[in-house]
Amino acid sequence: MLSKKDKQVILVVDDTPENIDVLCGVLRTEFKVKAALNGEKALKIAMSEQKPDMILLDIMMPEMDGYEVCRRLKKNPATSKIPIIFITAKNQAEDEKKGLELGAVDYITKPISPSIVLARVHTQLALYDQNRVLETKVRQRTEELNKTRLEIIQRLGRAAEFKDNETGMHVIRMSHYSRLIAEALEYSDDWAELIFQAAPMHDIGKIGIPDKVLLKPGKLDENEWKMMHQHPAFGAEIIGDHDSELLRMSKEIALAHHEKWDGSGYPQNIKAEDIPLSGRIIAIADVFDALTTERPYKKAWAVEDAIKLINDNSGSHFDPKLVPVFHEVMPEILDIKERYAEYALNLN
């Protein structure tokens, strides 16, 4: 027999204490029962550390009725999957239809039959448990696929980078720099992670640039610059159009990372916030790493000089709101720079 600690948790919500007592009497031998006399209390319990496995919810309550409680629970990702059974005196077909449309899994009318309540609770909890197992398996498989996909993206990014940086470490460093900036903006963690995953593809278009141009040790002439300016468009074409969020972000970054805040960049000459935020972030991360790394055509700059250039070009090349964010995360950037230095042997 399960201990009280191990029992599944049922939250009973009803503004009438007597109704709660009746349901508690039906459920407490098999489940751990929590109770709430109003919608606000129910929402707090549902958001607590030990979330209920199921909610039995009355409809007719003052201030916030059961429909609104259900609506709020289903809108919140943290509680949206908790199964809800309405238990109510509202016995019209349209009432039941509305409850089910809001996301409830079942609808029981009062006065209740204890055996029916238990049977319905058992059935829905079994389905919920099955769904959680399936979701876990799907999540594990998705993580495996995402890991493989990310590895392919990173390797493709390194393949492009190998053309003018033999270790391919540039894409690793600037990806980390980009994620640090994105995280500091306090957007969602998923978005910052997407930036990190897509960043290695920023220069994939270099594959289309002849080596005599890409690896030229001296300054490029006008025609050679025109050729170099095509690599963002080449990159966008190589990546193509996809339903994948990662590949869409990769294409966006590949096309936008050489645009400038004042509109003097390429290939589209767009400016300010018309440039995707991802491209504006990558622009800072990419330039900082390119400046502080030795290339066939230049020596590595000192960190202080690279920071000064970015400061001097705030509002012209770089988004003036992102430059201070870049400064905020500089200690972490310098840690990454050291960890993934050109002489580092670990490419993972």
Image: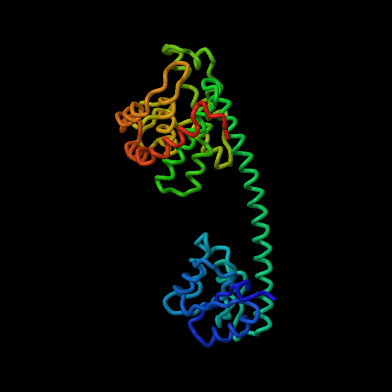
When the figure is inspected, residue 220 is found, relative to residue 258, above or below; the finding is above
Q: Nearer the viewer, residue 233 or 291?
A: 291
Q: How many marks?
A: 0
Q: Position of residue 94 (x, y in %)?
A: 57, 74
Quadrant of the drawing holding the C terminus: top right
Which residue occupies 39% across, 45% down? 185
The reply to whether residue 95 is visible in this rendering is: no
Q: Position of residue 186 (x, y in %)?
A: 41, 48
Q: Position of residue 30 (x, y in %)?
A: 65, 78
Q: Nearer the viewer, residue 293 or 31?
A: 293
Q: Quadrant of residue 95?
A: bottom right
Which residue occupies 56% across, 37% down? 247
Which residue occupies 54% across, 68% down? 50
Q: Position of residue 35 (x, y in %)?
A: 52, 78
Quadrant of the drawing holding the N terminus: bottom right
Which residue occupies 69% across, 72% down? 123
Q: Quadrant of residue 264?
A: top left
